[in-house]
Amino acid sequence: MSQILNEVLSANQAYAGSFNKGHLPLPPARHFAILTCMDARLDPAKYAGLSEGDAHVIRNAGGRASDDAIRSLVISYKLLGTREWFVIHHTDCGMELFTNEIMGDLLSSSLETATIDASGWHDVGKGPGSTEGKYINWLTIKNQEQSVVEDVTRIRNHVLVPKNIPIYGFIYDVKTGKLVEVPDAMAAGRPL
């Protein structure tokens, strides 16, 4: 067993030993959902003041409005009653550090972990790789504000998203912990 696996199982044992939240209902108590990045520096429970059972938190690389993220938001609304959605990207996001082409090229070389330095990304692994990565839109980010606007707009315009749901757009500042409103995203996400 790895050290990480042991640490996780030990932490879970301690958590389960005093667990008293088995009574929480399936729908989120505060009736909202957050779409945000998987970055380990973000703790939506802390920056949004959440406790278990309060809200749905959907996370992926970049906090992007992928088909799967929209699927989750629609389920959150249709079956579990959320009435407001937040799209929260963040400063210093790793999704700003590469393009679709870079990712495709790295995966073509090998499936091993790559490294980055001042001159860019380098594949240090040995093949085989896969060209399949060249056919995926990795939803990279060139401009944080614009990506929030794009994601809020994509969600707002999706055929399965009711027009009465407010969708808010923010950028979380990893240096200050503050949520910074993106005005154009807020406008795009207004309920109709």
Image: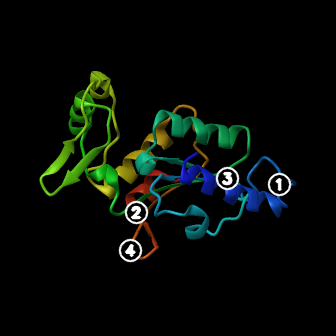
Closer mark to the observer between disc 3 and disc 2? 3
Q: Circle 2 is placed at which residue position?
A: 183
When the figure is inspected, residue 170 is found, relative to residue 65, above or below; the finding is below
Determine which quarter of the picture holds residue 46. bottom right
What is the x, y in percent for residue 79?
73, 38
- Asked if residue 42 lies left or right of residue 31, the reply is left
| Kind of residue sitting beneath label 4 | Lys
Sequence-wise, the earlier of marks 1 and 3 is 3
What is the x, y in percent for residue 130?
29, 23
Tell me the CA gap for discs 3 and 2: 43 Å
| Kind of residue sitting beneath label 3 | Leu
Residue nearer the viewer, 185 or 122 = 122
Tell me the CA gap for discs 2 and 4: 21 Å
- The reply to whether callout 1 and callout 4 are in contact (CB within 8 Å) is no
Q: Circle 1 is placed at which residue position?
A: 24
Density class for disc 2 (Cα within 10 Å; few <14, some 14-19, many ≥20) is: some
Q: Circle 4 is placed at which residue position?
A: 175
Residue at the spot 61% in from the left edge and 57% down from the top edge? 7
Q: Is residue 162 visible?
A: no
